[in-house]
Image (tube, rainbow, N blue to C red):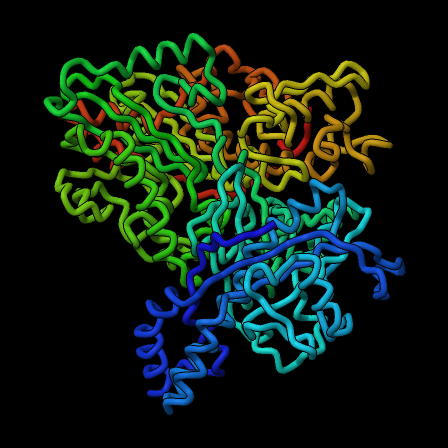
Amino acid sequence: MKITDFNIEISAENVCAFLDGDKTGDLYEEIMEELEEMLPQAYEKIRPVALLEFGDLEGYSIEADGKKVKEALFGVCSIGKEMGEWSTRLFAEGDYLGGMLADAIADDYLFQMDDVIQETVVSMCKERGRGIAGRAEAPKDLPMSIQKRAWDVTRAEEEGIGIKKSYMYDPVKTVCHVYLLDDNTKRYHPEHDCSKCNNLTCKRRNLPSVNIRVVTGEKETVIKGRKADSLLKTLQEHDIFIPAVCGGRGTCGKCSVRFTYGVVEPSEEDRKFFSKEKLEEGYRLACKAYPVQSCTVILDERESSGFFVLTDEGTADPAYGASQDDSAEQKEDVQIQGNPADVSYGIAVDIGTTTIAMQLLELPEGRQADVFTDINRQRAYGADVISRIKASNAGQKEELRKSICEQLAAGFHKLTDGKERKVSRMVIGGNSTMIHLLMGYSCETLGVYPFTPVDISLTHTTCRELLGLQDQEFDVMICPGVSTYVGGDITAGMYALDFDKREKPCVLVDLGTNGEMASGCKDRIMVTSTAAGPAFEGGNIVCGTGSIPGAICKVELDGEKVKLETIGNEEPCGICGTGVIDAVYELKKEEIMDETGLMEDPYFEDGLLLSEKNGGIRFYQKDVRELQLAKSAVRAGLETLISKYGITYDDIEHIYIAGGFGYQMDVQKAAHIGLLPAECLDKISAAGNTCLKGTIKALTDENAEERLRHLSGLASEVQLSNDKEFQEFYMEYMYFE
């Protein structure tokens, strides 16, 4: 095989490293200036070609894992003669810096060619039904004469590549690789391993950056990573999403990737989360993987693009959970009458910790025109607000702000159809942390006592100032919050449900990583927030996942027989929050688990097998404890709020469960495990995305600003951290009675 198409960008950083350049001082500046001038000429002079052919190794003795290798894939890469001739001429003319730069440019290009061809190398070996045990090179692993064998097998002479009696190639910027073939088709190691190379003077060893090929579905992207950085950090810096529930501490196991080559050594955390077979296949945690050489990693596209996102009227993204009828209704809703350019539009926004929902509406009627939903890419910095507060305080404030602003800008462009639709207003709701990150506020006081926000008041800005869209001057209103942990999303929800007009108290419960809740009517409102943790969203669950296609969302047990439902009816890939509640309920019902949450043998050790797919999806004793802590915190928070308000459940008109989790949850099962009060089953209903409903309502209500300010001012907060009553309730509701 002959390859001549190389889309390679020469790295100034690598060129400088080849010259042992120090990034400080006048010399570095001089090098960079000279390099900038030389690069256009260099690209014209480089004539890249890579030749790959299979052949035998007869006459050469080399072993891999104690077995003699008989066959190899030979590779010869060259950039042609012109770069070498140019370097020689510059030296002869006395331009020593230019000569060294030309040589370093050639080396960088040649090394990057090695990275580019490795995907083809793996593909060719797969087609042949062979793995790659490793790569051999002369003179370290094989005699120099192997270069003659490679030259013959690849027919390099036909490409103008010569070979000398010393077995050196002509042109000099030509290299030889010998990929040792293996019967193990799960083993592919075509990369050069600098850590095992005895050439300690090689310039490549000290290059500060590596090329990382990122594969998501059919999309491939090559990014540069620093050897000192984890793969997770590198992906974040290049705006590539990957879930990291624990914020990169290696405790959640959710940032799983698979190295197809350039595999890093497994960490202690990797050995904890992956089986021996998975480790051999190249599975690693991105947060604990530090690539020191070029590599390819495969990301799970389901986590990247498939979350169930709740929009208005309890409708989800049709691809991930809406019925056929729902989808049809949504499609009918979005039919635009007349010329879109002649209609004024508003955009309602819900910035959730996990997902983002944006809805375009025709004004003044408020008729839905379009919807945009996405995962909140800040998930890469941690699943919960505490993780993101820590990330912001650790110097990543600007990255977090940029992440959410770019997502909202992308949603704006999608909704406005390339700005054909003219937007006059935007209303945004979100919890206090999400708003701080959006506005670029410091989070230093959010995570430490007394947990003081910078600003949670109703705020007006412009789209240009907020999102950087220079030609968009329309007003953006941000809903006010009540406190650090009861934000504008709850205020918007109370407004959507008309708390300020009700005669009898109602309750709003938003179940997520924080369990936020409000109780009240037009006369008085009390709110609180409790740290539920990420269990309701599949976090800290061994085989947990978000609400993505393939997530187990319903579980039924009949003895040892397991019946499952998955989102989108796809192959099981993990278990999400609603599935977790179902699993715990069924374990208790079948008496596999007692009222304390203790699973009987053999389930205590082995867990409950839900599916054989994807290496086996199990629900473990640890998972029961995670759900136990979450449900106890929520129920105790609710009981404390009702007690402080001075009412009983008989006095409550209705209990609304907000959010996507509440929309999909089996209320009966949730009540039977103690998450919700069983005596109020006839009063409990899913309210959908109340935050988004509130921001939608605010676009068409001329009194919206006044009412939102009134609601946030009317509400008083119940602090649970040191509340004795809450602690008593917390212990009481740990049990599954």
Does 566 sit above or below residue 483? above
Residue at the far bottom in the pictured view: 94
Q: What count of labels does the image hold?
A: 0
- x 47%, y 12%: residue: 323
Residue 702 sits in quarter: top left
Residue at the far left in the pictured view: 342
* Nearer the observer, 323 or 18: 18
Does 9 sit above or below residue 324? below
* Nearer the observer, 206 or 100: 100
Report whether 511 appears left or right of 346.
right
- x 39%, y 15%: residue: 653
- x 58%, y 30%: residue: 577
Give the image location of residue 669, x and y in percent. 61, 18
Give the image location of residue 273, x and y in percent. 71, 47
* Nearer the observer, 639 or 565: 565
Report whether 512 appears left or right of 59.
left
Residue at the far top in the pictured view: 325
Query: Is residue 7 among what the camera can see?
Result: yes
Q: Quadrant of the C terminus?
A: top right
Report whether 472 appears left or right of 374.
left
- x 63%, y 34%: residue: 627
Report whether 433 appears left or right of 174.
left
Residue 714 sits in quarter: top left
Give the image location of residue 157, x and y in percent. 61, 63
Give the image location of residue 514, x and y in percent. 47, 39
Query: Is residue 716 among what the camera can see?
Result: no
